[in-house]
Every structure is written in structure tokens, then in C-alpha cells.
Image: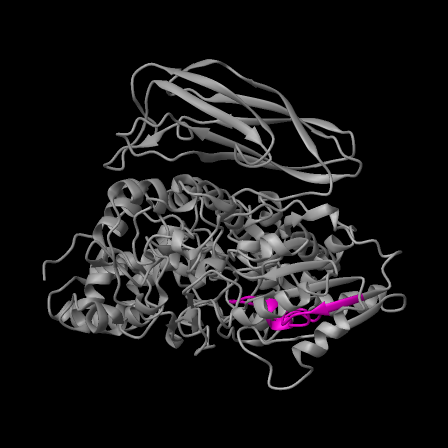
């Protein structure tokens, strides 16, 4: 096999620490001296290691090097929506897709800050005890910024939705929150995953070969990664399981060497997805054996292996597949991360070392979890203003459905465990149990009948006595999720963590139809990490609330919205299609007729859509009529709350280029958004700055260019054609301009 040439540059920052925490014993080793430069310290440390020690330190479960006073460290940690997988009680936020529905970058940045604060507190505590176990480290393998291109993908719940711009903005906010703003030390380390072109099917992810057109690669699959690397300065990247154009992502020269290192000048570390390097020989069949696979992955720039093959790199040196200098290049990136985290410095020098246990689940953190759960709620339908419910008039509620009192559903996947996890049933009882009769029935399991309990006929008979029926249904991470983690099997509509259709499980639909016959007002609260088609529900229930997996405060947020204590303002980060039959084949990575940017059919609820209990009006759109290519464009608009109560509006800016029938281009693209809170009658001016990159298009070869011509700009509460807003035409003058 032809050896690859690894791009080797000066590494200033990185993204995983091997847990090489300085012991208390005094030493004169230069790598312990914080007065020296990071490079000097890293070079000294590497020079003291044997080849066998080096290759072991390139694995996620790095062993102790006792002779140098370096303890063992496990690099693998998770923090998708709060610190995950520890044995401690922590603050748990809505699943990532729910946080995307907030369209609130500052709230997400704050969530990342809360997460790394709690993570640092736990790390500091165990460091003082003498050892940091797995899932207590500071190297978080998050955020997942893959594009949720198809609603059937089970892991889409971990992402920020289908749009590259929204994904990039939310992902950058998460990075800034996790990594902190100290000029010398990282609070924690974020990791952009899974690089790249990775979004199912889960069942074949270890052998699948994604072959996107260059246009789709650069227009859809890479922009969010570029944002996090080039703009947010993320310190880690995780390569994906699958192949891209024939090469496994963790040994893919075009992705890892040419794009990531050479074009984007990434200075951090790359980790493999767990046991992805083992897939090279076993499933992809691209390599003759594991020694060659490990060598090829390392030479392509995969610095850390989550798995158990990189000890074979020592044999790779003996066989001439690579040099020890190549190993040193990867090690320098890993040790640089350790230095930036303060792992080799006296702890009194590291500002984050003073964070104590008292911050974990503190009141401020719990309040923010509730805020984000509230902001994530998307009201999709509200016929005859059924909502908000009037607690003074309602005497009896029938609360029905498999997620009405299901704590595990609310936590999604990659989760931590909070001290208090409030379901809708718990919240209703606590708030209204002394004045409203609440009849609760699970009714069904998620996808099948319950083994015991009242019959459907008995539930319907009881529901007839209620003033309103609240059905809390949907699915859970037992049915959609990562292959191997989504354990529920044998039910129609699910396969290896993915879904084969986008309907509510039939057993729930059957019960809903029976409840409809009661002629009582019927409200559907849907918990899921993706979208349903709502084919029957959209015409037959009075109100639909998309509640995602809302974390520890899901029940409170749902009840707040249902009874009007909070005015919903969330927006859909996904397109709600009318039928699974409208979707292209799941294993096709072409973006043709996918997502709001390219789908040409009728949709149930569009990307960016969401209702409120108040109304908003737009006026005074201002932007210069002409601009020379290569210049920024300033846009401003006035937004007024024209209703009778305060509420949040998500102001969205879309850019559209004329369709000429020859050039591939999106129908429209989101290029700006602001979530604003307005009192009744309040008006505010919202400003946006469009960069040349925002106004550019990809050509068929993936080049991002800006050309002379007309561009339509729309600003409103959603996409044009679905919501009120204002628009203008911008004429760009001059020759084509390479803007990135």
C-alpha cells in the first residue's frame, strides 16, 4: 500500500487530553516547567518516551507512565446535552435537536458553559482523590454537526438539524461555551463529529461508502465543519465510521489531510470514532490487515484511536510503513491539548481548578435547563385557539399516552441523570392536582400494546368525562438512536436505530382515533428526536406541540406551554414531510429533493415554522439596492408584537438566487436569525450583516464563488410563503469573487 504524506505543521492547540495529570512529586523535567513554551515542553516529554509508550498513549484508554509520574487517563467523554454517563447527578438539558429548535445561540453557548463547569467540578473532585475514571475527563466528543438530511436517521436527534447555516451557528456556540474564554487555558475541549458525510443508515455504517457529488460535499456536508474549525477554533475533530469515495473517513487523505489540515489549517487533534480503525480490514475490506490499517489511519492524521489497535504502530515502524517521527507528530497534538488544559501545571495556576462540587445542579443551572426546554417547544397547530388551556375553567383532564410519565424518554440518548426529572404527569399533579381531576392512562407502550392495564374501551369511556384530552406520545431513544444503543427491536417502522417510516406508531394512532370519537378537545404532545408526518393528526386533533426529548424540565415546559404560563416560540430545525414516500432513498447522499433548500414538493410543516400565542408584524426592511461583489451587506428590519401578550419571535433571514435551470443552487437558504423577546405592542429593530460568503454559491466543483446578479432577501418569522415577512432585491455588481 502506498504510504501517505501527513501534513505536519506547528500545533498550537488540540482537543483531547491523555489525562497526563502532573503528580505532586517534585521534578525538574522541562515538560513540567510552565515557564517554557508549549512546544518546548511537548518536545521534551516526547523525547523521554519509548516507542512502546508512545503508541499506547495514542489510544483512548491511555495507560500510566509511572516513571515520568504520568497517571492513566481515558480520553472518552460525552456531553451532548449536559455531562453524560457519570455516576453523579447532573443538569440535563433538552436533546441537541431540541436545543436547535430554540434558534438561540446565546442560550446554547450558556448551556455549553454550564456543562463544562459541571464537568470541571467533577474532574477536580476526582483529581484530588487520586484518579479520574472514564467519563470524568475534560475531552468531550461533542457536538455532532452532521447534517440531518433524512428524518429516518436515528442519530439525527444528536444534531442541530438539516440546515448547514443553523448547524454551524449552533455548533460554534457550543464550542465557545464548552472551551471557555481564558487566554491561556481551555476549560474543556470540544470535538466536531463525525467528519464527514455521515448520517445513516445506521445498520451499514461500518461498511457504507458515501459518494456525494462535490457540489453537495461543499454546499451541505462540509460548511458546518468549516465554521467550527476556521471560525470557532474547535480543538478536536472525530472522523466517521463510513467511507467517503472509497476511503474510510479515519484514513481519508482528501478529508483529513487536504481539506482539514492543509486548506483549513486545523491545529488540533483528530480522534477516530470508536473502533472505526478496526473497520478498515474487517468491514470496509480496504486494508489487508490491522497493522496496515493503523499505520494508514495515523498517517492520514488520526492522532488518537478510540479502540485497541494503535499499539500495532510500533510494528508499523519496524515494517517501514511509517517512521517514529510520524508518531511524534500525532503525539505532539495530543500533548499540546494536555498543556492547554493545564494537566502538567500546578493546579493553583489553572483558573478552572477552583470550580467546586457546589455548582453541580445549582439553582442557576436548573433554571437554564428549564429555559431551554421552554424555548425548544414548537407549537405546530392550534385550531380554534384551543391552547392555552384555562386552568380556572377546566375541571377534569384525561392525560394519556406512553410518554406522559416516561422519565427515560425525556433524556434522549448520550445523557446524564438529574436528581429531579419532571414528567408532564408529575408537573400537572404538583400544580393542579388539588383543583383539577387528572385521569392518567399510559394506554399503550411506544410501539406495541401494554401487557396489562385498562383496555382502550375503558380509557375512551373515562376520557369522555374530561374537559380536554392531552395525549403525550411519540417515540424514544430505545427506538431511534445509534446502532447497538437503540435496543427495541421487532416492531414495524424501526431498524437498527433508524426508522423505516415517519409516522406515529400505529398502536398510538389507533388509540388517538378512538379518543377522537369522544368529541372532546384533543391535544397531541409529541416527543421525538425527529419529525412525524402527522398525516392523520394534522387534520383531526385540535393542537399539536412538538416537545422533542426535553431533558429534566420537559414536563414543566410542556405544562407551561399548555396552560399559557409560557408563550411558545420554538421553530422547526427540520422539514416535516407529508409522507415517507416523498423522500429519496435513505442511502442516497444526493441532496436533490432533500431538506427545505432543495425539496420541491408540498410539506406538512416547513423548516423554521412555529406558532405563538401572540402575533408579529414586519416593516421597514432596509438594505442597499446595489453592492459590489466582495462587500458586506447590512440589513435591518422592524419587528412588532401586535398581539396582547409578550412572546418570543425568531426573526429569520433567507437568501435566494434566481433559478436558471442550469446551475445547481438552493431554492433558498437561511443566512441569519435572531430570537427576540417583545412585550405586547413593543417594536424593535433587528440588524443582520451578510458576508460575501453568505451571498455566495457553490459551483459544481465545490468552489464557493460570488457572482454579479440579483439576489432576493426575505426577513420574517419563517420561510417566505409560510409566514408574514418583508423582502427586497439586491443587485450584486462586478466580476465573480472567491469569498472563501
- State how the image is colored: one colour
Rendered location of residue 575, percent (x, y): 48, 48
In the rendered image, residue 217 lying in the magenta stretch gets the answer no
| Quarter assignment of residue 614 | top right
Give the quadrant of the C terminus: top left
The reply to whether residue 33 is visible in this rendering is no
304 or 720: nearer the eye? 720
74 or 407: nearer the eye? 407
* Residues drawn in magenta: 397-420
Left or right for 149, reference 350? left
15 or 115: nearer the eye? 115
539 or 427: nearer the eye? 539
User: Measuring 52% from the left and 27% from the top, which residue is drawn there?
Assistant: 714
User: Measuring 25% from the left and 45% from the top, which residue is drawn there?
Assistant: 213
Left or right for 737, reference 462? left
| Quarter assignment of residue 405 | bottom right
Rendered location of residue 616, percent (x, y): 69, 32
Rendered location of residue 322, percent (x, y): 16, 62
Give the quadrant of the N terminus: bottom left
The reply to whether residue 444 is visible in this rendering is yes
Rendered location of residue 36, percent (x, y): 42, 51
The prevailing secondary structure element of the residues shown in magenta is loop
Amino acid at each position: 500500500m502506498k504510504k501517505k504524506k501527513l501534513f505536519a505543521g506547528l500545533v498550537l492547540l488540540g482537543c483531547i487530553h491523555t489525562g497526563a495529570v502532573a503528580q505532586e512529586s517534585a521534578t525538574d523535567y522541562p515538560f513540567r516547567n510552565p515557564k517554557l513554551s508549549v512546544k518546548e515542553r511537548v518536545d521534551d516529554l516526547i523525547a523521554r518516551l519509548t516507542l512502546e509508550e508512545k503508541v499506547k498513549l495514542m489510544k483512548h484508554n491511555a495507560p500510566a507512565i509511572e516513571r515520568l509520574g504520568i497517571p492513566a487517563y481515558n480520553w472518552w467523554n460525552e456531553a451532548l446535552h449536559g455531562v453524560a454517563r457519570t455516576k453523579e447527578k447532573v443538569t440535563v438539558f433538552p436533546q441537541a435537536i431540541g436545543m436547535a429548535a430554540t434558534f438561540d445561540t446565546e442560550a446554547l453557548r450558556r448551556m455549553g458553559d454550564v456543562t463544562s463547569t459541571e464537568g470541571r467540578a467533577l474532574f477536580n473532585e476526582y483529581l484530588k482523590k487520586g484518579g479520574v475514571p472514564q467519563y470524568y475527563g475534560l475531552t468531550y466528543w461533542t457536538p455532532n454537526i452532521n447534517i440531518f438530511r433524512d428524518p429516518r436517521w436515528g442519530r439525527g436527534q444528536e444534531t442541530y438539524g438539516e440546515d448547514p447555516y443553523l448547524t454551524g451557528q449552533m455548533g460554534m456556540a457550543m464550542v465557545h461555551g464548552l472551551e471557555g474564554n481564558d487566554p491561556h487555558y481551555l476549560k474543556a475541549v470540544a470535538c466536531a463529529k463525525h467528519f464527514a458525510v455521515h448520517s445513516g443508515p445506521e445498520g451499514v455504517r461500518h461498511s457504507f461508502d458515501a459518494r456525494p457529488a462535490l457540489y453537495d460535499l461543499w454546499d451541505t456536508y462540509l460548511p458546518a465543519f468549516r465554521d467550527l474549525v476556521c471560525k470557532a477554533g474547535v480543538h478536536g475533530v472525530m472522523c466517521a465510521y463510513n467511507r467517503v469515495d472509497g476511503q474510510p473517513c479515519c484514513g481519508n487523505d482528501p478529508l483529513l489531510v487536504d481539506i482539514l489540515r492543509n486548506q483549513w489549517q486545523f491545529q488540533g487533534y483528530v480522534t477516530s470514532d470508536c473502533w472505526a480503525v478496526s473497520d478498515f480490514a474487517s468491514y470496509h475490506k480496504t486494508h489487508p490487515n490491522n497493522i496496515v490499517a493503523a499505520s494508514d489511519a495515523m498517517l492520514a492524521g488520526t492522532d488518537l484511536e478510540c479502540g485497541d489497535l494503535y499499539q500495532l504502530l510500533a510494528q508499523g515502524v519496524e515494517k517501514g510503513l511509517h517512521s517514529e517521527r510520524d508518531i511524534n507528530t500525532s503525539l505532539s497534538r495530543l500533548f499540546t491539548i494536555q498543556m492547554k488544559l493545564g494537566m502538567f501545571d500546578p493546579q493553583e495556576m489553572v483558573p478552572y481548578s477552583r470550580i467546586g462540587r457546589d455548582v453541580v445542579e445549582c439553582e442557576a443551572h436548573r433554571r437554564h435547563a428549564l429555559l431551554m426546554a421552554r424555548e425548544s417547544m414548537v407549537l405546530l397547530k392550534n385550531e380554534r385557539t384551543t391552547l392555552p388551556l384555562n386552568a380556572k375553567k377546566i375541571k377534569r383532564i384525561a392525560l394519556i399516552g406512553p410518554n406522559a410519565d416516561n422519565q427515560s424518554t425525556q433524556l434522549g440518548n448520550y445523557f446524564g441523570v438529574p436528581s429531579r426529572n419532571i414528567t408532564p404527569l408529575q408537573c400537572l399533579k404538583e400544580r393542579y392536582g388539588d383543583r383539577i381531576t387528572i385521569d392518567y392512562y399510559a394506554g399503550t407502550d411506544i410501539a406495541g400494546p401494554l401487557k396489562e392495564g385498562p383496555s382502550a374501551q375503558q380509557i375512551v369511556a373515562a376520557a369522555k368525562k374530561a374537559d380536554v384530552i392531552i395525549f403525550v406520545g411519540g417515540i424514544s431513544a430505545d427506538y431511534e438512536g445509534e446502532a447497538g444503543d437503540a435496543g427495541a427491536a421487532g416492531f414495524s417502522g424501526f431498524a437498527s436505530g433508524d426508522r423505516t417510516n415517519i409516522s406515529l406508531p400505529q398502536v398510538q394512532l389507533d388509540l388517538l382515533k378512538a379518543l377522537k370519537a369522544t368529541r372532546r378537545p384533543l391535544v397531541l404532545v409529541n416527543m421525538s428526536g425527529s419529525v412525524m408526518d402527522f398525516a392523520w393528526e394534522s387534520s383531526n386533533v385540535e393542537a399539536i406541540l412538538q416537545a422533542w426529548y426535553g431533558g429534566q424540565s420537559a414536563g414543566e415546559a410542556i405544562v407551561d406551554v399548555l396552560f399559557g404560563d409560557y408563550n411558545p416560540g420554538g421553530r422547526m430545525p427540520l422539514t416535516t414531510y407529508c409522507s415517507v414516500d416523498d423522500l429519496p432513498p435513505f442511502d442516497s447522499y444526493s441532496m436533490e429533493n432533500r431538506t427545505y433548500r432543495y425539496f420541491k414538493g408540498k410539506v406538512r410543516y416547513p423548516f423554521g415554522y412555529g406558532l405563538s400565542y401572540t402575533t408579529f408584524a414586519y416593516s421597514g426592511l432596509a438594505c442597499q439596492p446595489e453592492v459590489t461583489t466582495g462587500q458586506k451587506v447590512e440589513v435591518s428590519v422592524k419587528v412588532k408584537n401586535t398581539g396582547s401578550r409578550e412572546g418570543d419571535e425568531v426573526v429569520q433571514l433567507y437568501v435566494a438566487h434566481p433559478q436558471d435551470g442550469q446551475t445547481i443552487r438552493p431554492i433558498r437558504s437561511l443566512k441569519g436569525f435572531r430570537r427576540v423577546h417583545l412585550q405586547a405592542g413593543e417594536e424593535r429593530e433587528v440588524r443582520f450583516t451578510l458576508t460575501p460568503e453568505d451571498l455566495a454559491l457553490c459551483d459544481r466543483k465545490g468552489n464557493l464563488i460570488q457572482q454579479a446578479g440579483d439576489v432576493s432577501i426575505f426577513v420574517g418569522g419563517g420561510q417566505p410563503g409560510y409566514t408574514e415577512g418583508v423582502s427586497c432585491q439586491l443587485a450584486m455588481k462586478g466580476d465573480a469573487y472567491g469569498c472563501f
